[in-house]
Amino acid sequence: MPRLSHFRSRLATLAALVVLLVPAAAATVQEAPDALVKRVSQEVLEIARTDPLVQSGNEARIREVVEGRLLPNFDFTRMTALAMGRNWRAATPEQQKRLTEEFRTLLVRTYSGALNQYRNETLDYKPLRMNPADSEVVVRTLVQKPGGAPIQIDYGMEKKPDGWKVFDVIVAGVSLVTNYRDEFNQQIQSGGIDGLVKALADKNKGAGGK
Amino acid sequence: MKTSWAVRLCARALVPALALLAGCATTASRVDPLEPANRALFEVHEVVDGNVVRPLAEAYVDYVPEPLRIGFSNFYNNIDDFFSGINGLLQGKLEKAGDDFGRVVVNTLFGLGGILDPASDLGIERGNEDFGQTFAYWGLPAGPYMFVPLFGPMTAVDATGYLLRILWGPVGQLSNVPLRNSLYGLSYVDLRARALAAGEIVDTAALDRYLFTRNAYLQRRRYLVHDGLPPPAPEDE
């Protein structure tokens, strides 16, 4: 039956093509890191510009925006590990989990505070120089404030199976993650890793901070 | 002889602990050998700033209309741009220096003596160079980190740079003392007002405001010295 075999071989070719194309399609579907930063910042700034609750400084709503729009694009485990430095490996998985949760909450609070101060800033996106094979990039943006000095905000990003994720935010040359390293170290030296967890938790409850 | 036994045990436990502490102290002292004194000065600063300077800066923002504040900021930035140009030259960064001097010419001639900033609208970027960066460029070590009440964080080399900047600045050349002092006062409040937002973020973000401020300052200076492309810091993971 020449016809059927012909059909079969076609089917096989088709199947092979599908198998070959699916990962390729998935790869192209994955949004480029600079496009991701641009889309998410524009979404968030648009909400900040138009949402009456955000404009009136409603904390719950601002936090909701930060949680819903920004956070899915962050890799908090990596951020926490970077801020911990070599102490990260000394922490138990349970401690690592709690640290990541508390650090995440702290960063959400910080980000919400920054968003609350947002007044008509505009964003410039600098061209991204990257090779297709790169698994880590820095996406550079410039925040223009009317009448103020522009502030450079860069995002360290890593390629993950579910898209590019931010693992560091660098504001005017100050890496948020690196900046925490000494503070984390100091807490660990005086109270161990549990001491750091407690310090972060206290800070998040609004009690901590010197 | 019970005590001597106890003493010896204590010594045995203490010596490694002290060694560890000394080890920590030496790593800390590399960037901040004056930390105890700096922390005390930081506390003084926090009290004065919280009770006098910050309320003043907040009142300035509340009561002085924004266009006026932007005008003052532009005026001081224009002077800074001139010095940025000089420091660009001192570091052989001719293109940057050209931009800075270009900005000064444009803003002084077409921006009402620097009150407006048409140069930025034309897309001429600020060089952001200063004497501290020039010293660093020529290999001078940063020297110890210092927290100076009312002025904030700086390294010894940056402090020298700020001093030169103030001594050689045009405001210092004014013979009318009340006018000169008013301009100094205004520039001070203007600078503090521009840092209000950052201060609020530090309040939310920092576990230890002293450390957070110090590290942010040192990172920022490193970034400026390397023109925005600092080499990767050691121990990045």
Image (spheres, coloured by chain):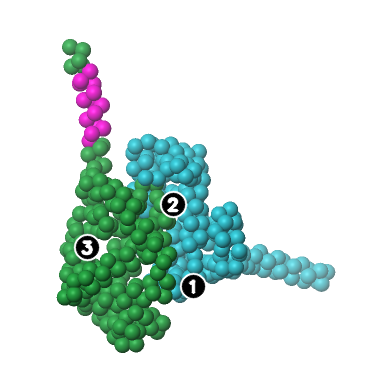
Chain colours: A cyan, B green
* Numbered tag placed on residue B158 in the rendering: 3
The earlier-in-sequence mark between 3 and 2 is 3
Tell me if mark 3 has few (under 14), some (14-19) or many (20+) residues whose alpha carbon lies within 10 angstroms of its own. Answer: many
User: SS class of the residue under badge 2?
Assistant: helix
Task: State the residue lying farthest toward the top.
Answer: B1
Q: Can you identify the residue that label 1 sits on?
A: A122
Q: Magenta part mainly helix, strand or loop?
A: helix
* Numbered tag placed on residue B204 in the rendering: 2
Q: Position of residue A147 (x, y in %)?
A: 41, 74
Q: CA distance from mark 1 to mark 2?
A: 24 Å
Task: State the residue lying farthest toward the bottom.
Answer: B109
The residue closer to the viewer here, A146 or A157, is A146
Residue type at mark 1: give it.
Answer: Thr
Q: Which residues are magenta?
A: B6-19
Q: Position of residue A5 (x, y in %)?
A: 78, 68
User: SS class of the residue under badge 3?
Assistant: helix
Q: Position of residue B56 (x, y in %)?
A: 35, 60
* Chain ID of residue with mark 2: B
Q: CA distance from mark 1 to mark 3?
A: 32 Å
> In front of the other: label 3 or label 2?
2
Tell me if mark 2 has few (under 14), some (14-19) or many (20+) residues whose alpha carbon lies within 10 angstroms of its own. Answer: many
Task: State the residue lying farthest toward the front.
Answer: B178
The residue closer to the viewer here, A128 or A175, is A175
Residue A205 visible somewhere in the drawing: yes
